[in-house]
């Protein structure tokens, strides 16, 4: 009976062993390669990631620089806008100041033209009078000498015109000058009220004295433009008025302007 076991011929054994060894080497090599492949992939991925991170960081740095530049530009624009706004406001203020100056100059021009017109009218009506005339008038109109002499004395002292003025040193306007004289002479009806200034009282002067249709020497005559003048009679050269004008204490013909009314003065 023959056995089923077969034996490799002796000449084929070395080749078989060699094939087995090569197969084992191949297996080991594949095993090594399979084990190295994840490491290689990891290295590649790490390198790619590092490169991507560096690129991203550069982009971030670039964006930061750009943002800083834009912020600086925005701040510059804001400052420029604020400066422009301040300059605009300053220019507007200058324009308003110029407008106010022009308005004031126009007002002054109008007042100057008015004063010149008044000067022309007044100059035509000026009446020369001095202390000699005062004495002659007083001889015919007893009681007027004291008033005339006081007015002429103040004229000699160059008492000047000042709107709203309240003293000899400061000056007077026409109404405040008349009120000053009346109070100096202690005329009744114009006594000071509590807290009332001379200027305030003078604006109400025509309401504090009785009305008269025919003035007498020493009465007050009211004219346009706020003139309040003392009335004097001169049968020789005609009636005249004396009081404060923009050109100082001046004697004028009584008809230099149409009177607004007469007020009677009760001299003490």
Image: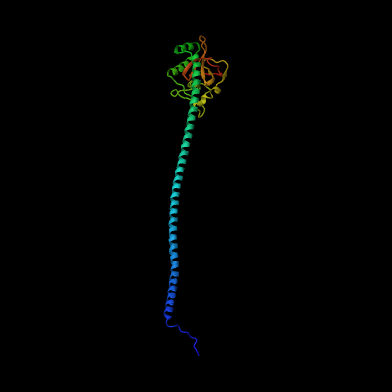
Residue 42, above or below 85: below
| Residue at image location 43% in from the left, 58% down from the top | 51
| Residue at image location 54% in from the left, 20% down from the top | 224
Residue 111, above or below 32: above
Q: How is the image coloured?
A: rainbow
| Total numbered labels | 0
Which residue ends up furthest to the top in the rendered image? 236
Whether residue 211 can be seen here: yes
Which residue ends up furthest to the right in the rendered image? 213
Using the rendered view, name the quadrant where residue 76 is placed. Answer: top left
Q: Position of residue 200 (x, y in %)?
A: 51, 26
Whether residue 143 can be seen here: no
Residue 79, above or below 97: below
Q: Position of residue 74 (x, y in %)?
A: 46, 45
Nearest the camera: 193 or 197?
A: 197
| Residue at image location 50% in from the left, 21% down from the top | 113
Q: Position of residue 238 (x, y in %)?
A: 52, 11
């Amino acid at each position: 009976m023959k056995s089923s076991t077969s034996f490799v011929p002796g000449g084929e054994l070395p080749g078989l062993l060699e094939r087995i060894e090569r197969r084992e080497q191949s297996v080991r090599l594949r095993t090594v390669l399979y084990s190295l492949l994840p490491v290689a992939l990891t290295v590649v991925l790490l390198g790619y990631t590092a490169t991507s991170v560096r690129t991203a960081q550069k982009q971030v740095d670039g964006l930061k620089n750009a943002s800083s530049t834009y912020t600086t530009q925005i701040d510059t624009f804001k400052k420029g806008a604020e400066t422009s706004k301040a300059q605009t406001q300053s220019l507007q203020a200058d324009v308003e100041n110029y407008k106010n100056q022009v308005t004031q100059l126009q007002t002054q021009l109008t007042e100057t033209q008015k004063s010149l017109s008044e000067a022309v009218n007044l100059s035509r009506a000026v009446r020369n009078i001095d202390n000699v005339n005062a004495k002659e008038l007083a001889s015919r109109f007893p009681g007027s000498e004291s008033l005339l002499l006081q007015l002429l004395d103040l004229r000699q002292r160059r008492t000047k015109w000042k709107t709203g003025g309240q003293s000899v040193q400061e000056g007077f306007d026409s109404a405040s000058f008349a009120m000053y004289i009346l109070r100096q002479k202690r005329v009744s009806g114009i006594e000071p009220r509590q807290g009332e200034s001379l200027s305030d009282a003078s604006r109400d002067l025509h309401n504090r004295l009785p009305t008269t249709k025919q003035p007498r020497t020493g009465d007050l005559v009211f004219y346009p433009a706020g003139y309040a003048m003392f009335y004097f009679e001169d049968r020789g050269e005609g009636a005249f008025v004396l009081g404060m004008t923009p050109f100082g204490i001046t004697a004028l013909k009584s008809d230099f302007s149409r009177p607004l009314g007469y007020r009677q003065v009760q001299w003490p």
